[in-house]
Image (spheres, coloured by chain):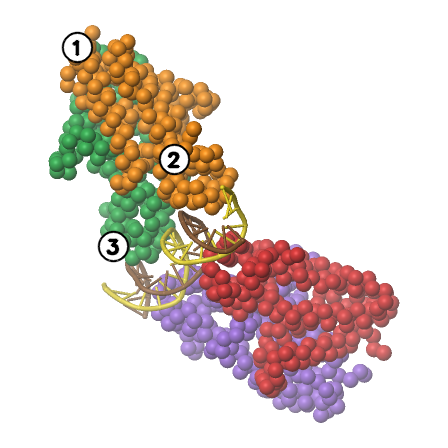
Chain colours: A orange, B green, C red, D purple, E yellow, F brown
Amino acid sequence: MSAYNEKQVQIMEAAEKLFADKGFEGTSVRDIAEGAGVNLAMISYYFGSKEKLMEAMFDHRASSSILQLEEMVNDKTLSPIQKVEKLIDRYIEKLLSQQCFHRIMVREQMVNNNGFIAEQIQQIKRKNQGLIKELIAQGQRSGEFRKNVDVSLFMITLVGTISQMVTTQHIYREMNNLQSMAEDDFQKHIRKKLSQHLKGIFKATLMYEQ
Amino acid sequence: MSAYNEKQVQIMEAAEKLFADKGFEGTSVRDIAEGAGVNLAMISYYFGSKEKLMEAMFDHRASSSILQLEEMVNDKTLSPIQKVEKLIDRYIEKLLSQQCFHRIMVREQMVNNNGFIAEQIQQIKRKNQGLIKELIAQGQRSGEFRKNVDVSLFMITLVGTISQMVTTQHIYREMNNLQSMAEDDFQKHIRKKLSQHLKGIFKATLMYEQ
Amino acid sequence: MSAYNEKQVQIMEAAEKLFADKGFEGTSVRDIAEGAGVNLAMISYYFGSKEKLMEAMFDHRASSSILQLEEMVNDKTLSPIQKVEKLIDRYIEKLLSQQCFHRIMVREQMVNNNGFIAEQIQQIKRKNQGLIKELIAQGQRSGEFRKNVDVSLFMITLVGTISQMVTTQHIYREMNNLQSMAEDDFQKHIRKKLSQHLKGIFKATLMYEQ
Amino acid sequence: MSAYNEKQVQIMEAAEKLFADKGFEGTSVRDIAEGAGVNLAMISYYFGSKEKLMEAMFDHRASSSILQLEEMVNDKTLSPIQKVEKLIDRYIEKLLSQQCFHRIMVREQMVNNNGFIAEQIQQIKRKNQGLIKELIAQGQRSGEFRKNVDVSLFMITLVGTISQMVTTQHIYREMNNLQSMAEDDFQKHIRKKLSQHLKGIFKATLMYEQ
DNA sequence: GATGAATGAGCTTTCATTCAT
DNA sequence: GATGAATGAAAGCTCATTCAT
């Protein structure tokens, strides 16, 4: 089914974890080989280079994790505000279930190179933003949402808030005295908190006061 | 006045830019020397090592950029909501006027090392959060702010939104067809936009509907 | 058979010669690579570091050159004085056939570090000295050797004399007008001379006058 | 009186200790500057280079420590064997009171370079050996000493034994359970032991049995 | 297809020395 | 005369990649 065989996936997953923890440059091919439990030469052999491995990993994760927004936007059974809430939960779910990958994306976005990956990221963003604009427009047409809404800024708050939580969760944990909470519970906890928090913000700012 | 001489500042500034663009590991000491226009050996001479240079730069920037929150929190001439607005503008100003440094912080926060820098960041965060909690409490005591407010989450949204703008501003620029705008104007533009956007969010979620 | 492959031995032998001539610190890894005719990176590849190479070389030589004293000490067919003579010849043979290694040992013994190598040397010395004490005791029990014999001092004279010859043989050569003698012949010459000289000393001082 | 001023002597003494402990190459100019408590640049300033400092130090020590053998050899009031005993004690005294310098000499003798220092050492050795040959000849003429005596070999045993003690005294100390003895006492102890030991050897091998 | 061996290029850091004052 | 600042050269080591099998 997948374009990658078992060993390749093994390597990509080890690479993802390491790139997320130590950055692309901070991770050596040796680290990856060791982490994946494969021979050092296999990485060049399978992917050509470390750079290409990054791209393959990116491609692998990105393609398997595109938000299925189209059908949701076009779903006639949901109200605009319901769609916004679903959108929020999807973003939370996606970013929190792929934290390693997300941390890599955060890093890569900052780099000013115009390589393959930066291009990929922009493409995804453009597409999502177009769909979300349409979603907001639906709410505006129905009279539920305010007229002057900057979709870009709302996306930045949505993604920025979740990102910030992903990248600084250990600080959040400590500041709220949650160190004793089991990791799984903590992950559920922050999903719930983020969901409530973001829905509150979006409702209060997108919609007219009732 | 400063603890660092002209040449040291020169090196630190070159390093800051490069670390922000390419990451700590992605930047070679040779790059920094070239960027600062100094001899390669000067870096070890002045800072001991690349690591120590990073710490010095961090120390330099962090100390010169602490938000003067104490006096603002204790300022009797401002209402709580005015303080929140001032807080927002300070954060925007700080993060946007030190974008390179901020990008480095974003990277460093992600790394799971417990080194000198991670410790520094946490310390600053802890202190700020304490002060902001006090600020919110003032609004709650005066009856202007809602009771159940999660300060941590609001900080995450505040910092996360600005961060996201800083790290992905080129995408924002492109998506909003602002490529032709001069860099300075664009910087002013996003400050203003962020200010309005965040103040709107905070007012709508912190305060009772009027 | 050996724990080291051909290339490793090649490197260790080049290192041994250079360490003996120029000292550990005076020898660069680049020198060794050139001397062994291998790539610079091979040394780290095979040994991890210059330090570890030294240890490996030491281990290699030390293990392959332990004096087989046990069986000689316990040999019933030899008289004590015959054993002493055999001991002298063995030491001469060992030190002169491994002059490079011996010069390294002389250097290393002087250094006040308590590293791996200093530990190794002491261990070997301790063991040998114990066996030789036993050998002397045999001669004392049989009435051939004097009672008050300081084994430590005799070892020091034995090793010190051969060492001194090894380290200053070029001076000895010149002072005795042996410059024209072929190297091989010269080596045989000093072995014979040392043998006679040391046997003379040991007989005259260990044994009662006959 | 001396050709060197106070600061220069200070530097040379620090250098001597460090060269003895860590070797010439293993000692950095920074170490010496720190050890001597002087500015780094002073070493090049006063001596020209590290190499030249070594030579100056060598010259300083060598000149101030030449064995006054001439007068002793020509002394009419002493018998040949008394002269030999005096010679032994002088060598012991010289080598043990200048252990640092002696360790440096041992190292330098091994090096196969024909530099200034190697030349110096050979010159001193040549001179001393000539005088000692004359001393032995006196004993032979008077009928006290054996005819076939290899002066070179006796010198090698004399210097080799003391050298070996100097360079491996920590091992000697440990093997003879003298760790608890105070350093000063230990130094006196080995002088006495060496004196007895070497005198015994020389008497027993140089003289006819009585 | 898979891998141990090998390597050129580059890394950070330290070195002895010199310069400007 | 004395020294903080500066530097070219070289150090040991690691890197991603390739090669021979």
What's the amino acid at mark 3?
Answer: Gly
Mark 3 vs mark 2: in front? 2
Q: Earlier in the sequence, mark 1 or mark 2?
A: 2
Q: Give the residue at mark 3.
A: B37
Q: CA distance from mark 1 to mark 2?
A: 43 Å
Mark 1 neighbour class, 10 Å CA radius: few under 14, some 14 to 19, many 20 or more: few
Q: Position of residue D199 (x, y in %)?
A: 71, 76
Q: Residue at x 37, y 72 (%)?
A: D48
Mark 3 neighbour class, 10 Å CA radius: few under 14, some 14 to 19, many 20 or more: few
Q: CA distance from mark 3 to mark 2?
A: 38 Å
Mark 3: secondary structure: loop
Quadrant of residue A91 in the image? top left
What's the amino acid at mark 1?
Answer: Gly
Mark 2: secondary structure: helix
Quadrant of residue B181 in the image? top left
Q: Chain of mark 2?
A: A
Q: Is residue D61 above or below residue A151?
A: below
Q: Give the residue at mark 1.
A: A143
What's the amino acid at mark 2?
Answer: Met
Q: Is residue D188 left or right of residue F11?
A: right
Q: Residue at x 55, y 72 (%)?
A: D110
Q: Residue at x 33, y 20 (%)?
A: A90
Q: Chain of mark 1?
A: A
Mark 1: secondary structure: loop
Whether labels 3 and 2 belong to a single chain: the reply is no
